[in-house]
Image (cartoon, rainbow, N blue to C red):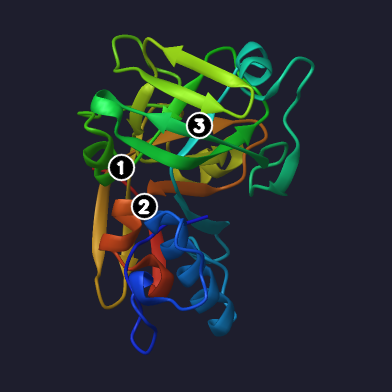
Amino acid sequence: MSTATMTPPGFPAASAVAGLPAGLERTQVERIVREIVLRSRGTPPSQATTASGRASGPKLVVSISARHCHLTDEHVEKLFGPGSTLTPHKNLYQDGFYAAEQTVMVVGPKRKMLPTVRVLGPTRKASQVELAFTDGISLGIDLPVRPSGKITGTPGCVLVGPAGAVELGEGVIRAERHVHMSLADAAHFGVKDGDRMSLLIKGSCSTVFRDLLVRADATSKLEVHIDTDEGNAADLDHAESVELMKQT
């Protein structure tokens, strides 16, 4: 679910795509172009999978977490109408989590906005918007890097849906890169919840991301989440291999 903005060789620039209505936002055009390119390659967008790098190790999935938001039940009703609930559109890799059909407009200072930000489910106790660094620039928000759910003292924004708007006093963050894993995976790597690990991505843009926050529990699958900027910098779509390592 990536919203990378690069135009691959052999394809027209987003602004030059023929046959699209003039009223489409540039971000929508870019997303359409990228989805067409990925379908033509026959590869899923922004996800790399490999073994852990150790013999008979667990399967590791590295996913780009594109801009999205989490909502409370109350805010779902305010944005989409009384009695509204989130409608699952696509299941995510972690069991029980999904991308909803609903999207919202995120409005920052000076009326700068992102027009279609996907809502993820299920609902939460507090609404939260997770963006990449470049999204923050577009909105005019200086994004703090925080673990998901740690939103005290963070900037706010306005969310706009088809039935109304919600003003968030806080909750806009750049999510700290992290790795989900089961307790068995944690034992395999010799780490525990709250520890830090490194991710090595090998390819034409080989990169090491340090300080991934370990989020270990009884049920999670082994999956790293990095944001759009990080995934593009490492060219994750063309990675030759990925390896998760205990940080020393």
Q: Position of residue 5 (x, y in %)?
A: 34, 63
Which SS class for mark 3?
strand
**Alpha carbon separation for disc pair 2 and 1:** 9 Å
Q: Residue furthest bottom?
A: 10
| Helix, strand or loop for disc 2 | helix
- Residue type, label 2: Thr
Q: Residue at x 30, y 53 (%)?
A: 230
- Residue 232, quarter of picture: bottom left
Q: SS for tag 1?
A: helix
Which numbered disc, 2 or 1, marks the residue that appears first in the sequence? 1
- Is residue 53 at least partly visible in the picture? no
- In the rendered image, which residue does mark 2 sit on? 228
Residue 42 visible in the current orientation = yes
Mark 2 nearby-residue class (10 Å; few <14, some 14–19, many ≥20) = many
* Amino acid type of the residue that numbered disc 3 sits on in the rendered structure: Cys
In this view, the residue farthest toward the right is: 83
Q: Amino acid at mark 1?
A: Asp
Query: Between 97 and 34, which is closer to the camera in this rendering?
Result: 34
Residue labelled with disc 1: 135
What is the distance, in whole Å, between disc 3 and disc 1 at their CAs? 13 Å
Viewer-closest of 192 and 143: 143
Quarter of the image with the C terminus is top left
What x and y, as percent, mark residue 44?
Answer: 57, 69
Residue found 37% across the figure and 28% down from its top? 107
Against 231, is 35 above or below? below
